[in-house]
Image: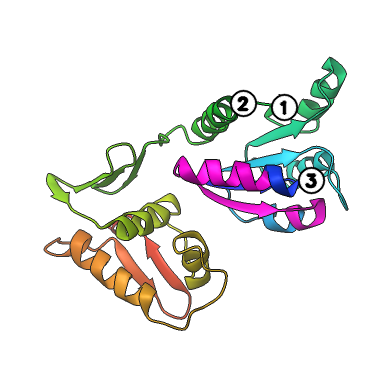
Amino acid sequence: MRILLIEDDREAAAYLSKALREAGHIVDHASDGEAGWHFADGAGYDVLIVDRMLPRRDGLSIVEGLRAKGDETPVLILSALGQVDDRVKGLRSGGDDYLTKPYAFTELLARVEALARRSRPGQSDTHYTVGDLVLDRLSHSVTRGSEEITLQPREFRLLEYLMKHAGQVVTRTMLLENVWDYHFDPQTNVIDVHISRLRSKIDRGQEKSLLTTVRGAGYMIREPQK
């Protein structure tokens, strides 16, 4: 899943980001409340992890602002403030869950995955489905219909990201940052090459294609149009 972490403690943020990525998730990090607000606003994250006490804009203000705009992205609030009144205030501000520092990473991960399941009743954390294409994150397998498709690790990660955002245009910048971990454009055709290989594997011999190029914008995977 795609997670936004808003945390001003750089050491804690680095540890948590690394652990979440090792668990198979895509993580963006904002180090203050104002940056976090701009990241979160309409960016399509699966879950937000928001520290309560942040510079420039506090965490509860971010959550309240998102809820006021109708954004229902699940939010896990992190805070050293653990009294009942503190937790109640966090939940009433629009938070979906509240975890007190210090915390165990395994508990945080379980809570994040539970929030994501609640927000996507038609999808599980372990499977993505687009038409007859199914990606299983646990077994690292991909099938289309009854045919098993063999992908290289980078191709699997690329397909996972595209399927996570099925029906949406995914830009080159999004792919560079979230699949290749580049925060600059290396000015190569690496994305085009991988998209071409992926398309040949999932669409070759099929009556209808799932992966399309949106000229001048990026790429999209979606169910075939009837």
Does residue 165 appear anywhere in the picture?
A: yes
In the structure shown, which secondary structural element does the residue marked by tag 3 occupy?
helix
Which residue is located at x 84 percent, y 40 percent?
53
Residue type marked 3:
Ile
Residue closer to the observer: 143 or 178? 178
Quote the CA–CA distance across marks 3 and 1: 22 Å
For the C terminus, which image quadrant?
Answer: bottom left
Magenta span covers which residues?
A: 13-36
Q: Which residue is farthest front?
A: 11
Q: Residue at x 56, y 50 (%)?
A: 27
Mark 2 burial class by Cα count in 10 Å: few <14, some 14-19, many 20+: few
**Is 114 above or below relative to 47?**
above
The answer to whether 145 is drawn above or below residue 204 in the figure is above
Q: Residue 104's mark?
A: 2
Instruction: State the separation of the CA atoms marked 3 and 2.
Output: 24 Å
Q: Position of residue 201 (x, y in %)?
A: 19, 62
Around disc 3, counting alpha carbons within 10 Å, would you say few (fewer than 14), some (14 to 19), or many (20 or more)? Answer: many
* Residue nearest the observer in this picture, 113 or 224: 113
Residue at figure coordinates x 80%, y 51% from the top left: 33
Is residue 155 found left or right of 31 in the rendered image?
A: left
What residue is shown with label 3?
A: 62
Which quadrant would residue 108 be assigned to in this image?
top right
Q: Which residue is mark 1?
A: 102
Query: Label 1 is placed on what type of residue?
Result: Pro
Q: Which is more N-terminal, label 1 or label 3? A: 3
Provide residue 61's location: percent of width, then percent of height. Answer: 84, 43
Determine whether 189 is above or below 59 in the image: below
Left or right of residue 97: residue 17: left
Asked whether 71 or 197 is in front, the reply is 197
